[in-house]
Amino acid sequence: MSTPAAGRLTGLTAVVTGGAGGIGRATVARLTADGARVAVLDRAAVGAGPGRADLVIHADVTDAGSLAAAAAQVATRFGRCDLLVVTAGVAVVGTAGDCTDADWDEVFAVNARGAWLTFRAFLPVLNRPARFVTVASAAGLRPMPQLAAYSAAKAALIGLTRSIALDYAADGIRANCVCPGQVSTPLAARVQRDRPPGERSAVAEFADYPVKRAGRPEEVAGAIAYLCGPEAGYVTGSVLAVDGGRTLH
């Protein structure tokens, strides 16, 4: 995986959805350290993004109109987008039988449909060559208990990313997916908090991980930075597990 190198992404413009916190925030910091100009899209309040972001836009990835307006802002400010990174995500704890219609629809609206809407909105302003990187989850490769909607939506996101890789390779767009395991983020903390009594704790769950700890957002951001960089010019349709080995079991 690449290490921070000032200048490796100089002259490139990156857009990061969900960039105000967690993996998204670490990705913004990493891409700016590598020299990219970065626009943050998040439905958190404007100004909630990392201080080093060049542009912060209040946008909702479930709203096509909101994304179209964000793409127009990026085009006006920077002229184009070279790196489109989708980190926005939500999770609801529950089995397939437990989930309400609203739970299921929200998780798919953000995690799967939101990525599709984001790609479609920014496609007209994507430079060529371009990089499209999505953040799915190890749960999309190997489902996690009590996370039926999340696991299913992340599996759908992997399929979407690979379809884009296939359809747009000749157009100069490289599309790849990063699948983190358990990472120390506010979202992961909320999931642990919402688990039913008696469910395995985060510490006990690491019994399934050859690397016996949670990941750090910066480690996932390093994988994203690699896929955004010139070293990954021959990489497309890849599903990169950054999961401490969880999916080996």
Image (cartoon, rainbow, N blue to C red):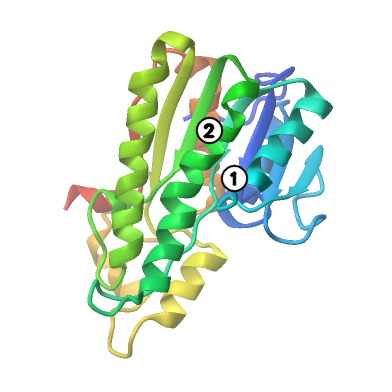
Q: Which residue is located at x 63 percent, y 31 percent?
A: 4
Q: Please give left or right for residue 136 compared with residue 37 in the image.
A: left
Q: Which residue is located at x 65 percent, y 45 percent?
A: 65
User: Circle 1 sits on which residue?
Assistant: 64
Separation of residues labelled 2 and 1 (CA atoms): 9 Å
User: Circle 2 sits on which residue?
Assistant: 120
Name the element at disc 2.
helix
Q: Percent x, y for residue 218?
A: 56, 46
Of residues 119 and 183, the one nearer the viewer is 119
Name the kind of residue labelled 2 in the image.
Arg
Q: Which residue is located at x 43 percent, y 62 percent?
A: 107
The single residue placed furthest to the front in the displayed view is: 65
Query: For the residue carrying disc 2, how many other residues have a C-alpha within 10 Å: few (<14), some (14-19), or many (20+)?
Result: some
Name the kind of residue labelled 1 in the image.
Ala
Query: For the residue carrying disc 1, how many other residues have a C-alpha within 10 Å: few (<14), some (14-19), or many (20+)?
Result: some
Q: Which residue is located at x 28 percent, y 89 percent?
A: 198
**Is 128 above or below relative to 188?**
above
Q: Please give left or right for residue 164 compared with residue 77 in the image.
A: left
Name the element at disc 1.
helix
Label at residue 84: none
The single residue placed furthest to the left in the displayed view is: 249
Q: Percent x, y for residue 160?
A: 36, 37
Of callouts 2 and 1, the N-terminal one: 1
The single residue placed furthest to the top in the displayed view is: 170
